[in-house]
């Protein structure tokens, strides 16, 4: 679950997490220093070590990260003192964590979510790191790593695209062809329905998967620039462009799996595994649900079809994870060196060897050991004109979690009420974006 | 948030329990010196710490935070640094009442929650208690079975019932074949169904809770009353209606208060069930979803908490008044 694109719509955080969160919120002013005190290591700076706060609590990524740090120690003699927290807890507490005594370096996401903390002065600009590592990354990744002020704040490690997944054997058996335009997609859905398949698997119980569907339709229909404006709160949700994206979605909705709001993405993925569904729109982490090797080899994907020829398939949604440096690291010199190492292809190679469900953020990566799925994902990202993150990483998380997630769940249930829904979204958006 | 959980327990706060040991202790030590030197220095120190520490904690953790929440309800704050707190007056409330599509459903669901709990599991619990009170065979087994859900935490109950309601693989849909396209019943996602689905789970637990309360109440009923009514020729129903039930009045008050509290603090069950999605919105969940997170709307969340606080006060104050009035009379 480390790849959950959403930080907020967490599928059932543990009760302890929750209580701690509430405790933090309730204790308000008095609580913040207290709470965050448990986050940092608290000890005086040891010149031979750098502290690192990690949200990688699941076994596979945790081990993969540990191997990077071990390699770094071998190379430089510097210990990376890792402070791992449950990933949901880490995301919920990031706010008070960064205000207290955070670790020197911490794991985080690219996009608005990174820029937000940068703009609040809770992270250090790392332009000096980028002087060294700039050549390792394609331009799209460089752009992603900058704050609103144009300075660098982020070192990307890995990324993964969103796409429509399908099973090669099903497509071969029924003679389906990969659709490249909207009309072909609708025609394929109709055919699948006739053949007794659920055309598109769908589970939106955790409320974030639907954000991904909207993103795809929106930037195919209205282009990358409009997506950015809309996410930044600049474009209006009552704009005819948004309405047209929702109209398209309403056209596609009847081909989605019934009862999506009550189903988790894992359960939805199972219908693709069992060949009951023809396609599934999700990130490559859907592969985690294919536990049988033969099934996994049968899994393939294609980019969301073109809607407006002016934009084609030039945008790829590719959430990117990486590292940031806290506002006043105890051991800044070593933190910079560590980040320089993390920005190398070498560090990425180590990570990917242990966690093959994602791909390199750096260019010139060693793709020889990639699975066919990874190769395809890498090519898709490398060939993209623009990369988006995900709605809850490209926009204010408080807006996406309290307004967009419930609104899209409502839309899925009742696509006809779209006009009043959009004006309600717009009204709420105005207050939230005006608040700070 | 803080408020709803703590208000009802005010009567049980630690200060009340502190003075007796000290005062009971002192006279035995220095009986002769009159009332001026009742306590030794050590006694006073102990008393000070015993009463003072809880008081400080109580004031800090209950009153200061509650008042801070009320103040914050009139501001916007993203939780980062104190200088980002901005005074906005009644803006949060205006936004809440006119512009939040989840607010009124949440209020409604809290009310529905109360009405359902008082109308279904409460009479059920009373019924079970009356039956068990008759000392039928295996009554202890039944008692344990019905009380078992109360021992579980609401979060666990949420997980258990999710397995029952899961629309694809859950018990109900698998049994009745409602997990196929066309006949699909989405217990968790359908806003017309999910509230009732959750309420059944809540009632399952509440019944046991009520049963135990009433059972305790029934144990306190004087057996001679039953005897007298049977001598007067009353049948079982008449005895219950005219003799037993009226004597359960104090229990009924407790039941009412407990049920109101359960309805207002409803949270964990729904949170694990579907996170308060469409159809199951609750005030407590709105508070949480606005306050917790990486860039939170603490002012706005506090405004919802204040609404919840006001509703709690409207319910609790009359109860406290009537309780105190009774005490004064006695």
Image: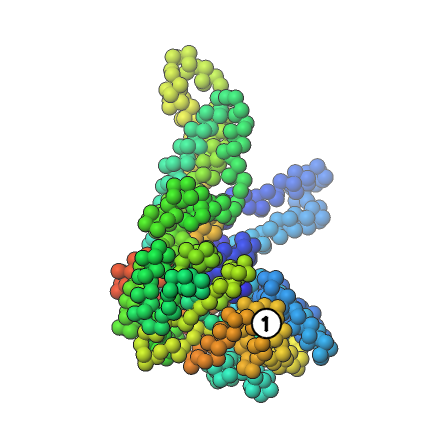
Q: Residue at x 31, y 59 (%)?
A: A254
Residue A388 locus on image (x, y percent): 43, 75
- Residue A410 seen anywhere in this rendered image of the structure: no
Q: Secondary structure at mark 1?
A: helix
Q: A215 above or below B155?
A: below
How many residues crowd mark 1 within 10 Å: few (<14), some (14–19), many (20+)? many
The chain containing the residue under callout 1 comes to: A
Residue named by callout 1: A352
Query: Which quadrant would residue A83 be assigned to in this image?
Result: bottom right
Q: B121 above or below A410?
A: above
Residue A352 locus on image (x, y percent): 59, 72
Residue A266 versus residue A51: which sits nearer the camera?
A266
Residue A200 locus on image (x, y percent): 38, 61
Q: Residue at x 37, y 45 (%)?
A: B178
> Does B143 sit left or right of A189 as displayed?
right
Residue A374 versus residue B293: which sits nearer the camera?
A374
> Does B124 sit left or right of A360 as displayed?
left
Q: Residue at x 49, y 24 (%)?
A: B133
Which quadrant would the C terminus of chain A be assigned to in this image? bottom left
Q: Residue at x 54, y 53 (%)?
A: A15
Residue A405 versus residue A219: which sits nearer the camera?
A219
Q: A105 above or below A37?
A: below
Query: Which quadrant would residue A230 be assigned to in this image?
Result: bottom left
Residue A387 versus residue A435: which sits nearer the camera?
A387
Q: B256 above or below A208?
A: above
């Amino acid at each position: 679950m480390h790849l959950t694109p959403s930080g907020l719509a967490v599928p059932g955080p543990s009760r302890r997490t929750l209580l701690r969160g509430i405790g933090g919120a309730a204790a308000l002013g008095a609580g913040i220093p207290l709470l965050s005190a448990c986050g940092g290591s608290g000890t005086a700076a040891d010149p031979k070590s750098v502290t690192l706060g990690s949200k990688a609590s699941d076994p596979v990524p945790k081990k993969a990260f540990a191997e990077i740090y071990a390699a770094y120690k071998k190379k430089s003699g510097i210990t990376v003192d890792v402070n791992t927290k449950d990933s949901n807890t880490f995301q919920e507490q990031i706010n008070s964590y960064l205000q207290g005594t955070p670790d020197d370096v911490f794991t985080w996401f690219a996009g608005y979510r990174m820029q937000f903390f940068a703009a609040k002065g809770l992270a250090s600009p790392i332009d000096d790191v980028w002087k060294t590592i700039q050549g390792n990354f394609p331009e799209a990744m460089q752009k992603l790593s900058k704050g609103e002020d144009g300075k660098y704040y982020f070192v990307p490690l890995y990324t993964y695209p969103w796409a429509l997944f399908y099973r090669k054997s099903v497509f071969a058996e029924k003679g389906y062809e990969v659709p490249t335009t909207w009309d072909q997609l609708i025609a394929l859905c109709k055919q699948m329905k006739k053949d007794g398949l659920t055309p598109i698997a769908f589970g939106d119980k955790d409320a974030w998967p639907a954000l991904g569907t909207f993103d795809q339709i929106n930037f195919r229909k209205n282009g990358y620039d409009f997506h950015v404006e809309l996410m930044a709160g600049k474009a209006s949700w009552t704009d005819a462009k948004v309405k047209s994206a929702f109209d398209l979605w309403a056209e596609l909705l009847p081909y989605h799996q019934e009862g999506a709001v009550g189903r988790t993405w894992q359960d939805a993925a199972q219908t693709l595994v069992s060949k009951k569904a023809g396609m599934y729109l999700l990130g490559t982490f859907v592969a985690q649900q294919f536990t049988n090797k033969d099934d996994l080899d049968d899994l393939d994907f294609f980019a969301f079809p073109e809607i407006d020829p002016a934009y084609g398939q030039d945008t790829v949604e590719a959430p990117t994870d990486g590292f940031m440096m806290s506002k006043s690291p105890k051991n800044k010199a070593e933190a910079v060196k560590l980040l320089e190492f993390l920005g190398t292809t070498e560090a990425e190679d180590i990570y990917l060897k242990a966690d093959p469900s994602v791909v390199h953020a750096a260019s010139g990566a060693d793709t020889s050991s990639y699975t066919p799925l990874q190769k395809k994902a890498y090519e898709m990202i490398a060939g993209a004109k623009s990369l988006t993150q995900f709605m809850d990483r490209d926009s204010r998380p408080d807006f996406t979690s309290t307004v967009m997630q419930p609104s899209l769940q409502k839309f899925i249930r009742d696509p006809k009420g779209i006009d009043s829904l959009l004006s309600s979204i717009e009204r709420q958006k105005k207050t939230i974006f005006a608040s700070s | 948030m803080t408020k709803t959980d703590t208000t009802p327990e005010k009567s049980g706060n630690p200060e009340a329990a502190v003075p007796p040991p000290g005062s009971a202790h002192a006279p035995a030590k220095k009986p002769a010196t009159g009332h001026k030197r009742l306590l030794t220095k050590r006694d006073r120190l102990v008393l000070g710490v015993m009463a003072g520490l809880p008081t400080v904690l109580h004031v800090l953790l209950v009153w200061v935070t509650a008042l801070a929440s009320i103040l914050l309800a009139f501001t916007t704050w993203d939780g980062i640094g104190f200088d980002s707190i901005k005074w906005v007056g009644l803006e949060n409330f205006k936004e809440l009442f006119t512009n939040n599509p989840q607010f009124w459903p949440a209020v409604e669901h809290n009310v529905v929650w109360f009405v359902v709990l008082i109308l279904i599991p409460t009479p059920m619990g009373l019924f079970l208690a009356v039956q068990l009170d008759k000392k039928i065979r295996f009554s202890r087994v039944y008692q344990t079975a019905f009380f078992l859900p109360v021992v579980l935490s609401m979060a666990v109950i949420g997980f258990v019932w999710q397995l029952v309601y899961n629309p694809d693989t859950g018990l109900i849909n698998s049994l009745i074949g409602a997990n196929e396209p066309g006949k699909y019943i989405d217990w968790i996602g359908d806003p017309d169904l999910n509230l009732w689905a959750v309420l059944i789970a809540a009632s399952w637990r509440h019944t046991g809770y009520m049963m135990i309360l009433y059972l305790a109440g029934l144990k306190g009923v004087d057996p001679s009353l039953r005897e007298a009514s049977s001598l007067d020729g009353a049948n079982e129903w008449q005895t219950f209606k005219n003799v037993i039930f009226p004597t359960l009045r104090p229990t009924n008050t407790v039941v009412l208060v407990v049920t109101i509290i359960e309805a207002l603090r409803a949270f964990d069950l729904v949170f694990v069930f579907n996170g308060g999605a469409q159809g199951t919105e609750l005030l407590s969940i709105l508070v949480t979803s606005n306050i917790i997170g990486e860039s939170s709307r603490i002012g706005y969340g506090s405004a919802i908490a204040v609404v919840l606080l006001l509703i709690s006060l409207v319910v609790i104050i009359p109860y406290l008044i009537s309780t105190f009035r009774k005490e004064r009379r006695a």
